[in-house]
């Protein structure tokens, strides 16, 4: 296979993967956009959703898949409501390091809690999606990637519409802008915070299902969370469209770095390249491609 | 007043327990990782270790002396491992079993100073196979050098007895341990006439589409050697499957083939054909495992879940069996349970013809070779679980040894 | 009740500038010196000394991180990477150039400081979460470079073994010798930090933390001092890395992963941001916490759990307790253990006349 067709094929893979990253990053952006909180436990959310669903669908509990998915959804929604109430609400207005640390603590709790309740053995998560590749001209896609990419785009568009066009979405953006002013305008700030966390929980549940079926489910699934940062920095921390574009760029860079730089370096540059790109981005446009530039005043 | 008498009584009782405990108990310090990055392994391996020791104790221990295993989970972090080691030392451990490569590195010097032997099956460095350099550390399992050599031999057999002009892909987790298989390939490639290329999977290894695409469609490998850890093996299986690559042309190193990986990749039918290398037998058809099941039955308990994950569970049994064999040899040589770490070290050299019905390879540990010969066995995934594909074997010993000596000379 | 400021008059500048101005602080410093330099080595066994040695190393690292995060307000999630820079610098110097131990210690620190300055450059433009993510990237990039440069990492193994440290021909190979050395370094680090914070630099850090734009307006060169903060903090981290390397006899980048950075962050959060005592307490707390949980679970948990179940529960509980403690501290006592200590002290300060 020549270099060009190979590059094209890699690019196709990269885009598909990038959209899967976008899905995980979306949860992060939703929370940041609405509540200004940085969630370092996004990967653990994905993990716990995957663990719950895979455990319920396994022989030990024997739920049918749709019921397990539904139960996973309910679990994530309730969990995130509780989380917002107990952990994050008291931290409103605290310095950023507090919130980051709280979510890091939360990540540790989830890594202990998942295996304690559902067992630590890895599980498979089989979706009724075939394994054999789908062929579009020169491109080979695995169906799960296509489904993942499709779901990502669907959700991203859905949330984009939500934030721009609906009353709740506008209110949420107002809340993100200024807690004080939106309270004064009669917006129930706390309700919108809870809503943001719930939305992030739903997204994490989808991420858990798709990534879980890609790679199997155990505590290691949380590592997909590390992919979030380059994506959101590139796209902008508070931009939905940025998540899509950032995800695609990161996916592409990863795939091409792995195909064309690795052979010369003798090591995996796939996870390294996105971080370099991210640093460059931070130096040029710290607020990302589509992020809002904040002007500070005293 | 009353509280003081109670406290005093409690203290006396505690010291009484302690003193009876230390009289004849053989103490082993056992480190484990049940929650850190390698928890997949630890959660199956550690129960296996305890179960075998319990089995021996239920049969009267080692010549009437009870074996006590103190476990400490260090979460794959070095400072807790150092703490754990010192704790074991206060408990007069005869043998310490570190867990994890960085921890083995951090402790190997100290253990030699304190004259406490230990094993590092599947961890640490190939260099530890040299008993003259690390007199108290016993890898007891095939090093990555040996595994790499065995994999080449296996590929040769699978590709019709010759590797002339064949292409081998080496896909590895991008860390020092992952790279350790490469020098052997480098050495064997001209000798056997094959070409190879390496494909790095950087941590966390949850996604490796591009690498597999490269292997299967650009490089077009005739055979794949896979040295992956953690979540990566199951991802690689799925990706190979999607790329339409025959899994019987893939052989995984020892951390790339647990039952958990197969299950997570979509079950046995999906993974059919996949070969994995092991330094302890896989499967449940070993007499010793039956005895453990009987032990649980006799106690009226259900057998633990970990027993289903035989790749790692059996490694726990394997480690425990080798440890206890060494201790037993030491007790026999001394004639009493009053032994030291050095006696146990010498006990390792006396392990002969000890295979527990095929669960252990025919280890031959000598003063020079702490690897025990570098034995591996390849098992293949079938619809109903792992089936052995080869017998215990080893390959290219001269080349492995040569490389080892060159490396030792280089790092001295 | 001993803590009395009344009757202490500062009549000249010299007295105003002393580090330990009150008799009570001199007394407690003396007590600490007695406790850690005389009593501990005489009375404690090897195990306890090992624990204290690990704590002493952690104290140095935690102080460094607290200077950056707690005093200068620049969040860093890449502290462990600077430790690995120090560790590999020292290991290379000692194996390749045979440099004496007492020189490799500052050399490792200086190298880490140099890298820290580079990592600090983005802090000119970015702050808060962006800076945190930049330091996260630094963690990964430094790890990657060490992992892939055999000339730094010493070959395929990416680890370099070194001998025990020697000071002027005296080999530190006993636990008590190592302990004495480490605790001395930790004490020096504490005193240096105390003086740093009282200096112009320290006050500039605090001004930047509290409001960087305002700090710039009153004439503090924000960029310069942010770089200072990164450099000094990385110096401490580098020294920590060197200490780990000598203590364990090996430099290996796997000892300095992201998890370690997070542990150090947890130390200063639980100990108290922007507090020296807090860094020390946090180092004690995080180092000893797993041991405490294990002891507790072994003694209490064994009453109602089977040993097999207990082993895995201990591990999982440790994670849960660790996470919960961080969250509880953040919610209930954001200023950490240091605040608790101050509360206790203030209570006794006016005791028994608390009105």
Image: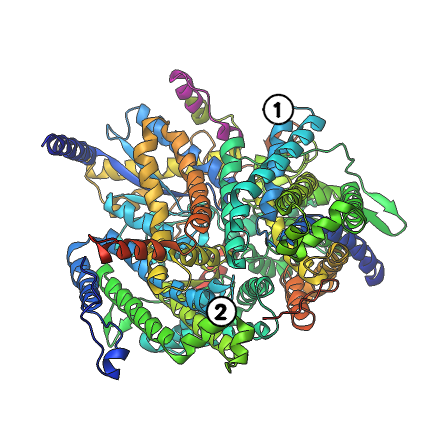
Find residue A59 and name its label: 1
* A237 displayed left or right of C117: right
- Mark 1–mark 2 distance (CA, rounded to whole Å): 54 Å
- The part of the image, by quadrant, that contains residue C32 is bottom left
User: Does B340 sit left or right of B251 as displayed?
Assistant: left
Rendered view: B256 above or below C214:
above
Q: Nearer the viewer, residue A121 or B123?
A: A121
Are callouts 1 and 2 both on one chain? no
Prevailing SS of the magenta stretch: helix
Say which element carries label 1.
loop
Q: Quadrant of the N terminus of chain A?
A: bottom right
Write down the chain letter for disc 1: A
> Which of the 4 image quadrants contains residue B351?
top left
Percent across and percent down for residue C270 are 40, 54
Q: Position of residue B412 (x, y in %)?
A: 40, 67
Residue at the limit of the structure toward the front, as seen here = C355
Q: Chain of mark 2?
A: C
Nearer to me, B297 or A149: A149
**Residue A3: percent from left, percent from top:** 81, 62
Q: Residue C209: give its label.
A: 2
Residue B394 seen in the figure: no
- Read off the magenta span: B292-308
């Amino acid at each position: 296979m020549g270099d060009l067709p190979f590059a094209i094929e890699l690019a196709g893979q990269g885009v598909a993967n990038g959209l899967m990253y976008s899905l995980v990053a979306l949860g992060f952006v939703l929370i940041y956009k609405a509540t200004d909180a940085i969630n370092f436990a996004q990967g653990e959310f994905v993990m716990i959703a995957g663990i719950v669903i895979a455990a319920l669908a396994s022989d030990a509990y024997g739920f049918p898949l749709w019921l397990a998915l539904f139960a996973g959804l309910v679990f994530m929604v309730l969990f995130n409501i509780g989380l917002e109430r107990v952990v994050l609400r008291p931290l409103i207005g605290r310095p950023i390091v507090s919130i980051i640390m709280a979510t890091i603590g939360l990540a540790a709790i989830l890594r202990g809690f998942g295996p304690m309740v559902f067992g630590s053995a890895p599980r498979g998560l089989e979706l009724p999606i075939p394994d054999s590749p789908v062929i579009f001209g020169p491109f080979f896609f695995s169906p799960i990637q296509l489904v993942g990419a499709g779901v990502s785009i669907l959700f991203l568009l859905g949330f984009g519409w939500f934030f721009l066009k609906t009353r709740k979405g506008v209110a949420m953006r107002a809340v993100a802008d200024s807690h004080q002013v939106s309270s004064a305008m009669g917006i129930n700030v706390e309700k919108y915070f809870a809503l943001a966390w719930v939305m992030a929980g739903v997204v994490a549940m989808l991420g858990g299902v798709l990534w879980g079926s890609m790679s199997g489910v155990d505590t290691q699934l949380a590592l997909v969370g590390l992919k979030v940062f380059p994506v959101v920095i590139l796209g902008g921390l508070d931009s939905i469209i940025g998540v899509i574009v950032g995800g695609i760029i990161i996916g592409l860079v990863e795939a091409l770095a792995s195909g064309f730089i690795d052979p010369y370096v003798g090591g995996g540059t796939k996870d390294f390249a996105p971080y370099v790109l991210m640093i460059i981005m931070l130096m040029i446009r710290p607020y990302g491609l589509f992020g809002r530039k904040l002007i500070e005043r005293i | 007043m009353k509280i003081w008498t109670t406290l005093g009584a409690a203290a006396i009782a505690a010291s009484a327990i302690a003193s009876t405990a230390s009289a004849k108990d053989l103490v082993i310090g056992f480190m484990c990782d049940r929650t850190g990055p390698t928890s997949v392994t630890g959660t199956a391996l550690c129960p296996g270790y305890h179960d075998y020791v319990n089995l021996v104790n239920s049969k009267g221990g080692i010549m009437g002396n009870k074996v006590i295993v103190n476990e400490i989970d260090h979460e794959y972090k070095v400072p807790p491992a150092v703490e754990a080691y010192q704790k074991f030392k206060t408990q007069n451990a005869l043998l310490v079993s570190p867990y994890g490569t960085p921890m083995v590195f951090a402790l190997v010097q100290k253990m030699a100073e304190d004259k406490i032997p230990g094993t590092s099956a599947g961890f640490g460095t190939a260099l530890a196979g040299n008993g003259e350099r690390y007199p108290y550390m016993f890898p007891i399992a095939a090093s990555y050098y040996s595994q790499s050599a065995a994999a080449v031999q296996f590929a040769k057999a699978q590709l019709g007895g010759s590797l002339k002009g064949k292409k081998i892909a080496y896909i590895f987790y991008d860390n020092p341990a992952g790279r350790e298989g490469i020098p052997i390939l480098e050495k064997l490639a001209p000798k056997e006439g094959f070409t190879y290329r390496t494909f790095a999977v950087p941590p966390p290894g949850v996604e490796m589409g591009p690498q597999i695409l490269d292997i299967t469609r650009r490089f077009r490998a005739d055979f794949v050697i896979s040295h992956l850890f953690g979540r990566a093996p199951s991802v690689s299986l799925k990706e190979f499957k999607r790329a339409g690559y025959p899994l019987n042309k893939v052989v995984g190193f020892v951390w790339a083939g647990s039952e958990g990986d197969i299950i997570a990749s979509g079950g046995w039918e999906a993974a059919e054909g996949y070969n994995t290398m092991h330094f302890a037998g896989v499967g449940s058809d070993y007499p010793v495992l039956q005895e453990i099941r009987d032990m649980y039955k006799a106690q009226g308990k259900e057998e633990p879940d970990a027993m289903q994950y035989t790749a790692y569970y059996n490694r726990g049994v394997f480690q425990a069996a080798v440890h206890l064999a060494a201790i037993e040899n030491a007790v026999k040589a001394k004639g009493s349970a009053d032994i030291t770490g050095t006696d146990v070290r010498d006990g390792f050299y006396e392990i002969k013809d000890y295979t527990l019905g095929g669960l252990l390879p025919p280890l031959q540990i000598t003063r020079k070779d702490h690897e025990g010969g570098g034995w591996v066995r390849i098992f293949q995934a079938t619809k109903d679980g792992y089936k052995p594909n080869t017998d215990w074997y080893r390959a290219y010993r001269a080349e492995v040894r040569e490389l080892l000596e060159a490396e030792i000379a280089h790092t001295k | 009740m001993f803590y009395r400021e009344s009757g202490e008059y500062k009549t000249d500048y010299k007295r105003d500038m002393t580090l330990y101005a009150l008799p009570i602080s001199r007394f407690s410093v003396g007590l600490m010196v007695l406790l850690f330099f005389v009593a501990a080595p005489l009375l404690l066994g090897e195990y306890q000394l090992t624990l204290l040695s690990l704590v002493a190393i952690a104290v140095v690292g935690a102080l460094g991180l607290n200077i950056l995060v707690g005093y200068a307000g620049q969040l860093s999630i890449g502290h462990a990477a600077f430790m690995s820079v120090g560790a590999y610098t020292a290991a290379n110097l000692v194996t390749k150039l045979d440099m004496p131990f007492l020189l490799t210690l500052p050399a490792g620190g200086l190298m880490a400081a140099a890298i820290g300055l580079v990592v600090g450059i983005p802090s000119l433009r970015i702050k808060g979460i962006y800076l945190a993510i930049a330091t996260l990237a630094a963690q990964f990039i430094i790890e990657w470079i060490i992992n892939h440069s055999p000339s730094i990492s010493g070959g395929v193994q990416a680890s370099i073994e070194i001998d025990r440290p020697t000071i002027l021909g005296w080999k530190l190979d006993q636990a008590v010798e190592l302990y004495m050395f480490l605790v001395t370094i930790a004490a020096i680090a504490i005193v240096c930090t105390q003086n740093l914070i009282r200096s112009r630099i320290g006050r500039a850090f605090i001004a930047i933390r509290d409001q960087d734009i305002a700090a710039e307006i009153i004439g503090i060169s924000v960029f310069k001092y942010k770089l200072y903060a990164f450099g000094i903090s990385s110096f401490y981290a580098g020294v920590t890395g060197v200490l780990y390397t000598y203590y364990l006899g090996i430099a290996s980048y796997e000892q300095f992963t992201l998890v370690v950075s997070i542990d150090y962050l947890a130390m200063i959060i639980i100990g108290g941001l922007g507090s020296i005592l807090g860094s020390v307490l946090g180092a004690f707390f995080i180092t000893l916490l797993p041991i405490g949980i294990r002891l507790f679970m072994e003694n209490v948990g064994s009453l109602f759990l089977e040993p097999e179940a207990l082993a895995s529960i201990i591990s999982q509980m440790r994670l849960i307790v660790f996470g919960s403690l961080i969250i509880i501290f953040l919610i209930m006592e954001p200023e950490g253990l240091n605040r608790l200590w101050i509360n206790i002290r203030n209570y006794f300060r006016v005791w028994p006349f608390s009105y």
